[in-house]
């Protein structure tokens, strides 16, 4: 029964995230925002929405390890599992902005999370404000430095949607995310009790993989369609939003504390390691290109993480 709750929750989260993504992209196109900004902000935020809803719900239900494990596990999954699998479908060209903007911001956000948790094992409301404030500053910088969108470069399925459909997708997305998170939290916590494992183990494995499905689907489709606007930047953007928006907003609502020490002694170090290793992979052996071999290496790293976690 608990597996059914989790599966049902993940299905609702996937559909909810997809509907929210459609409404968000359509709205941003109506506002004439650059595709680069759409990718790094709107798309990243929409695909991070499942993590946001799950984490807030978990924290409010006094399951902070589930909230933290979900974000840390999702960040590991985005770069290890999602990027790894995506590269198996073909090489990926990396934008020049990766090493200048996206990667440094992700590293700073990751180090902020590490420092806040190392201090007293709690992300306080003030620290949540600092995380979210950094995100706002980052978004303002992007909006000021990126150019306007060129509608002639849009794919057929990216043509601006009418207002009624935007509203419909938004409502369906919100309902799907809320309902999916309710089912997922109930199923995950009950499953942890049934199997005698901690909420952290369920969060960094099953839950994090499930909430990373929107990123996986979007990335594979993008590579197959050779879509330049959807690339590594979106996965990096998703990781940035997971820390700054998901944990920032969650901790503003209610402080997020660590119960399971392995979140600090194991999981967060994996997150930092895989975040740092992306930079040399992008530049070696060929600059600004990620290949099939890089994908295999990332998948081996992710499988090692899962094996050592279980």
Image (cartoon, helix red, strand yellow):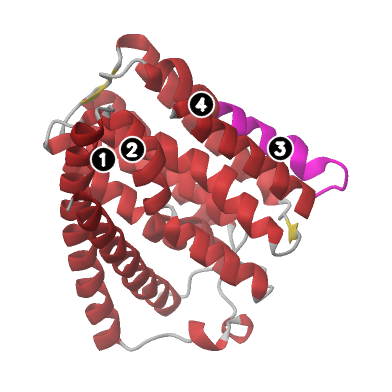
Mark whose residue sits in front, 1 or 2? 2
Q: Earlier in the sequence, mark 1 or mark 4?
A: 1
In the displayed structure image, the side of residue 140 where residue 298 appears, left or right: right
Label 1 vs label 4: CA separation?
30 Å
Label 3 sits on a secondary structure element that is helix
Where 237 sits versus 35, above or below?
above
Q: Where residue 194 is drawn, which disc sits there?
A: none
Q: Where residue 249 is drawn, which disc sits there?
A: 1
Label 1 vs label 2: CA separation?
19 Å
In the displayed structure image, the side of residue 159 where residue 180 appears, left or right: left
Q: Earlier in the sequence, mark 1 or mark 2?
A: 2
Q: Is residue 243 visible?
A: no
Q: Which residue is mark 3?
A: 279
Nearer to me, 271 or 144: 271
Q: Give me the residue at 43% from left, 29% from top.
A: 310
Q: Give me the residue at 52% from left, 31% from top.
A: 307
Q: Which residue is mark 4?
A: 308
Q: Residue furthest top?
A: 119
The prevailing secondary structure element of the residues shown in magenta is helix
Nearer to me, 47 or 299: 299
Q: Earlier in the sequence, mark 3 or mark 4?
A: 3
> Bounds of the magenta span?
271-288
Label 1 sits on a secondary structure element that is helix
Label 2 sits on a secondary structure element that is helix
In the displayed structure image, the side of residue 45 where residue 299 appears, left or right: right
Rendered location of residue 209, percent (x, y): 42, 48
**In contact (CB < 8 Å): disc 2 and disc 4:** no
Label 3 vs label 4: CA separation?
24 Å
Residue 150: name its quadrant. bottom right
Label 3 vs label 1: CA separation?
28 Å
Label 2 vs label 4: CA separation?
15 Å
């Amino acid at each position: 029964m608990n597996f059914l709750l989790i599966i049902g929750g993940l299905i609702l989260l996937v559909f909810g995230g997809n509907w929210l993504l459609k409404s968000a992209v359509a709205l941003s196109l109506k506002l004439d925002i650059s595709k680069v900004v759409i990718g790094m902000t709107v798309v990243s935020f929409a695909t991070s929405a499942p993590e946001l809803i799950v984490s807030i719900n978990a924290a409010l239900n006094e399951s902070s390890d589930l909230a933290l494990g979900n974000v840390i596990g999702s960040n590991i999954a985005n770069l290890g599992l999602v990027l790894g699998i995506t590269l198996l479908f073909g090489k990926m060209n990396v934008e020049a902005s990766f090493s200048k903007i996206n990667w440094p911001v992700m590293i700073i956000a990751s180090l902020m999370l590490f420092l806040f948790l190392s201090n007293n094992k709690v992300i306080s409301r003030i620290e949540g404000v600092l995380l979210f404030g950094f995100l706002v500053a980052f978004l303002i910088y992007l909006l000021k430095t990126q150019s306007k969108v060129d509608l002639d470069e849009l794919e057929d399925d990216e043509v601006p949607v009418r207002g009624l459909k935007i509203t419909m997708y938004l409502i369906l997305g919100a309902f799907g995310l809320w309902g999916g998170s309710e089912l997922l939290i109930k199923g995950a916590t009950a499953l942890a009790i049934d199997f005698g494992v901690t909420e952290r183990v369920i969060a960094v494995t099953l839950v994090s993989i499930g909430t990373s499905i929107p990123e996986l689907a979007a990335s594979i489709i993008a590579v197959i369609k050779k879509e330049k606007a959807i690339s590594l930047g979106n996965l990096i953007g998703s990781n940035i939003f997971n820390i700054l928006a998901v944990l920032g907003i969650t901790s503003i609502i209610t402080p997020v504390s660590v119960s399971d020490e392995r979140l600090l002694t194991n999981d967060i170090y994996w997150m930092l390691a895989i975040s740092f290793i992306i930079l040399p992979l992008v530049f070696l052996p060929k600059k600004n290109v990620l290949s099939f071999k890089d994908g295999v290496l990332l998948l081996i790293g992710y499988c090692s993480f899962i094996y050592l976690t279980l």
